[in-house]
Every structure is written in structure tokens, then in C-alpha cells.
Amino acid sequence: MPQPHPAVPFWAPKDDTRSGGVDLGPLPEWNLTDLYTSPKGQDLARDFADAERRIAAFEVHRGQVAGLDSGAFGAGIAEYEGISETLGKIGSVCPALAVGGRSDPSAALFRNLERYRLAALCFRLEYRLRQESSH
């Protein structure tokens, strides 16, 4: 019975020895440039700024949901989903963009700063919804 390959994280350097000497063959390399060009790319900065702006606009309506008609309520749901989609895209790609290795200080700094920014935005979006639903 063949032995399973030990877990080798996707961010491991190509010369990582955790394969136990087993040749894993050619490993896939992700091309994330369709999503974001780089950790410092304008497209990522633009999505963060867009999420900030959209969340700020969304927060303005706090405390008013009960008085919305069905069209305005539906528009609010659509806006929430759009914001969530942008935050999900950022959250799924940022760790992969920061794969400079765990020992690369610039990758670690990017990873931690983006994780913090993303968490703060998600908190603002979700906290407002929880405040609204508790009234």
C-alpha cells in the first residue's frame, strides 16, 4: 500500500525537505495575476478602498432597516453581497500573494497588515448587521 505524501504547505520553498525524499513531481504554481497583480498592486489597493467606501455608505443606513420598503431592502441585500464578495476575494488571495516564505519579513508584514485590514472591514460590516438585528 502506498504511503501518503507528508503535508507540504503551498508556501514552502521549492527545496523544502519535508517530502521525506519522495519526488512529488512537478508541483502546481498558481498564477494569481488575474485577481491581483501583486501585493503592492493598484488593483488590490483599489479593492480595499472600494470596500472601505461601500462599507461607510452601508453604515449610514444603520437603524433604518425596519422602515425600508421591499425594493430598498433588496438593494441593501445586494450591496451587502457585493461588499462580501470583494472582501472574500481579498481574503482568499492575500495569503497566497504573501508566499515569499515564512522567513521573508516583507511577506510576513504584508500578510499581517492585510489580515488586520480585512478583519477590521469585516467587523465593521458584520457588527452593523448585528446591531441592526438586535433592535
Image: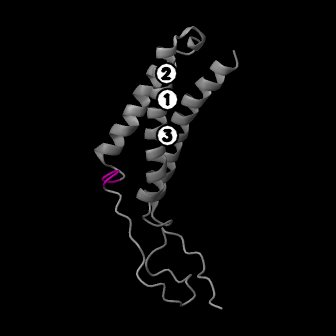
Check disc 2 and give the amino acid type: Gly
Check disc 3 and give the amino acid type: Arg
Which residue is identified by label 3? 117
User: Which percent across, then down, holds residue 98?
Assistant: 43, 58
Q: Which mark is residue 30?
A: none
Image: 39 above or below 69: below
User: Which percent across, then down, holds residue 39?
Assistant: 37, 52
Earlier along the polypeptide chain: callout 2 or callout 1?
2
Which residue is identified by label 2? 74
Residue at 49% x, 36% y: name it: 84
Earlier along the polypeptide chain: callout 3 or callout 2?
2
Check disc 1 and give the amino acid type: Tyr
Q: CA distance from mark 2 to mark 1?
A: 10 Å
Which residue is identified by label 1? 80
Earlier along the polypeptide chain: callout 3 or callout 1?
1
Q: CA distance from mark 3 to mark 2?
A: 28 Å
